[in-house]
Image: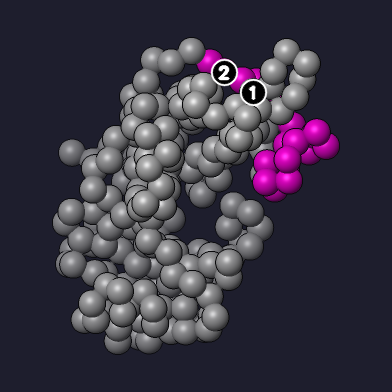
Amino acid sequence: MLDKRLYHHLVSWLGQWPAGRALQVVGSERRVRPGWDGRPHPVVGVGAPGGAVLSVPPDKVEAVRALADLPLTDLLAKLPTAVGRPGWRAQRTVFRYCLAPAPLPDAGDWIDSADESLPPWLRQFTNPVLVARDADGTFLAGVGLKRHDAHGQEIAVGTVPAARDRGLARRLVAQAARRVLDGGAVPTYLHAVGNAASAKVASAAGFRDRGWTAYGISAD
């Protein structure tokens, strides 16, 4: 049975869950409103073994549904143009969630994301971020939480090259996941299909691969 927090998160974030078919294209006003970073995210999708929901702006539903019978590679190639973002790139990532984080020791402290000593990628978050530093205060690794809605928060983690392979990332991710769960939401974790290092961190922190996939588009 699907965890109720995850269910409510997917319904809120996408506009519908479950899919009910191999690919369910739905329109949602969430796609034209600012997301976690203050910018709209015109395509958000999640796929599970039973089917995928692809959420797009309401006025783009028919254009995207016209692509639904294409092979996935072709659909993704045409998706940005179908939603009015030619030149953007479609992304397919691994979608993970966690209900029982690994019992790893805490590795950092929650601080204000406006702290000027933080790297730019962490300062884009509007809520506190989790940071690990060495004895002299040098930044080593951090986690930011993408608050998609009241029921789901996505964990983003980064480690400076000199501090990698120490287990910091997995400890921070598990620590952040406990905070999200304590707050009544479900923590999620997305990573590129071929990113073995990120997959290893996720698994070690308690985010197992269930065969779920996420979809989106970006200008990068």
Describe the element under mark 1 as helix, strand or loop: strand
How many callouts does the rendering have? 2
Residue behind mark 1: 132
Instruction: Give me the C-alpha separation between circle 1 and circle 2.
Output: 6 Å
Residue behind mark 2: 107
Q: Where is 149 relative to 109, above or below?
A: below
Dominant secondary structure, magenta = loop
Residue at 63% across, 30% down: 162
Q: Which residues are magenta?
A: 106-124
Quick check: 1 left or right of 130? left
Quick check: 149 left or right of 117? left
Residue at 54% across, 37% down: 157
Q: Are marks 1 and 2 in contact (CB under 8 Å)?
A: yes
Residue 44, position as x, y percentages in the image = 43, 63
User: How many C-alpha atoms fall within 10 Å of the one at disc 2: few (<14), some, or many (≥20)?
Assistant: many
Type of the residue with mark 2: Ala
Residue 153, position as x, y percentages in the image = 49, 41
